């Protein structure tokens, strides 16, 4: 179902120095992802990639849902062609998050179903409330996950659990999702914002280039033979020591932490 709100109404962006907070604002539709929301999110991610953002937090409005999926009303009369375009629009967002030169954090309370679970999985970290409900219910609608779920699930939870979630539409609580490795951190609902802020602080403590290299290498490990991955890691590790040639004036963190050798 569409509404009269604009893209800017539906995707609200607030930047505070190195932190960009994005809120999907469709509370009456449980923040369902329509074309405006997908485009608005992709634009926010692309913009944040150029403005010094180090952490992006993505949240849903209201208490009931992070995102209850792709917009079912919008999809009801899709032709195969329109469905293909919609799926590709979702993929554009997931790829933008994958490649972004910052760390994305999904703040999940309530429902994260279908496209909502996929959006959360596309983020680097998921911080969830105990009241979160994750799932890929698409097969019940005669669909399959269309925003990358079939490709991201196994990397998060392994083949056995991924298969269970994808073919039965089984839902997971926040706690179960944490136990199965779908989410990074789970907390009591009233502590969710505090845990998100702890997570942000943890990311910001790291040296920016090192944090982004760590993201890149961890992601790449899923798709690269071990030997090549190690070789890539060694090059990146060496680059961390290339401070003089890059003219970096920052204090060397190794000097602060290292103490005496020998
Ligand atoms: N799209 C559009 N509208 C949605 C929606 C969605 N995915 N999910 C909820 N809404 C709307 C409802 O239609 C309802 O609107 P009205 O008040 O106008 O009737 C409103 O949000 C509140 O929802 P409910 O009254 O259903 O709330 P509830 O608490 O009884 O149930 C729920 C909550 C279990 C999440 C239920 O809304 C639900 O099952 N939603 C659909 C979840 C789903 O199947 N998601 C997958 C979509 S397919 C997909 O995502 C494909 C893909 O990968 C690309």
Image (spheres, grey):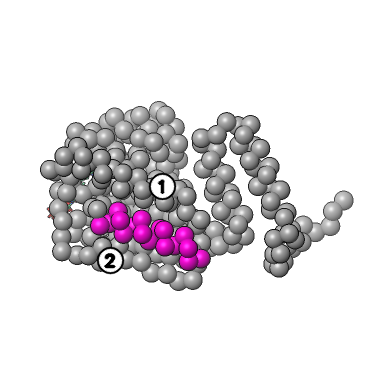
Q: Residue at x 32, y 66 (%)?
A: 12
Secondary structure of the residue carrying numbered label 1? helix
Secondary structure of the residue carrying numbered label 2? helix
On the image, numbered disc 2 is attached to which residue?
A: 8
- Find out whether residue 118 is within the magenta segment: no
Q: Is residue 218 left or right of residue 16?
A: right
Q: Residue at x 23, y 53 (%)?
A: 34
Residue extending furthest toward the bottom? 16
Dominant secondary structure, magenta: helix
Task: Give percent across and percent down for residue 125.
Answer: 46, 50
Residue 26 vs residue 220, the one in the foreground = 220
> Magenta stretch?
36-52
Task: Give percent across and percent down for residue 257.
Answer: 73, 59
Task: Give percent across and percent down for residue 62.
Answer: 26, 61
Residue 224 seen in render:
yes
Q: Is residue 1 left or right of residue 144?
A: left
Q: What's the mark number on residue 12?
A: none
On the image, numbered disc 1 is attached to which residue?
A: 95
The answer to whether 84 is drawn above or below residue 246 in the figure is above
Q: How far apart in space, not on screen, are marks 2 and 1 (Cα)?
A: 21 Å
The answer to whether 225 is drawn above or below residue 3 in the figure is above
Q: Residue at x 84, y 57 (%)?
A: 260
Task: Give percent across and percent down for residue 100.
Answer: 47, 54
Residue extending furthest toward the front? 81
């Amino acid at each position: 179902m569409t509404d009269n709100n604009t893209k800017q109404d539906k995707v609200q962006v607030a930047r505070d120095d190195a932190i960009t907070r994005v809120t999907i604002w469709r509370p009456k539709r449980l923040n369902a992802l329509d074309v405006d929301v997908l485009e608005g999110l992709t634009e926010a991610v692309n913009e944040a990639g150029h403005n010094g953002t180090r952490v992006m937090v993505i949240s849903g409005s209201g208490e009931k849902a992070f995102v209850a999926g792709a917009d079912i009303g919008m999809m009801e009369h899709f032709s195969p062609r329109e469905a293909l375009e919609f799926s590709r629009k979702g993929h554009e967002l997931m790829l933008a998050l994958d490649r972004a030169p910052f760390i994305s954090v999904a703040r999940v309370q309530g429902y994260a179903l279908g496209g909502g679970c996929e959006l959360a999985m596309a983020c680097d970290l998921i911080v969830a409330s105990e009241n979160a409900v994750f799932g890929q219910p698409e097969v019940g609608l005669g669909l399959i996950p269309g925003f990358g779920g079939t490709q991201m699930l196994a990397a998060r939870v392994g083949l056995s659990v991924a298969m269970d979630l994808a073919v039965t539409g089984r839902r997971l609580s926040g706690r179960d999702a944490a136990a199965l490795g779908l989410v990074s951190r789970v907390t009591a609902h009233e502590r969710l914002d505090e845990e998100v802020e702890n997570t942000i602080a943890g990311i910001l403590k790291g040296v920016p280039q090192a944090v982004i290299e760590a993201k890149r290498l961890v992601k790449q490990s899923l798709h690269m033979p071990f030997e090549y991955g190690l070789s890539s890691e060694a090059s990146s590790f060496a680059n961390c020591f290339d401070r003089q040639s890059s003219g970096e004036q920052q204090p060397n963190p190794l000097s602060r932490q290292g103490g005496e050798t020998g």
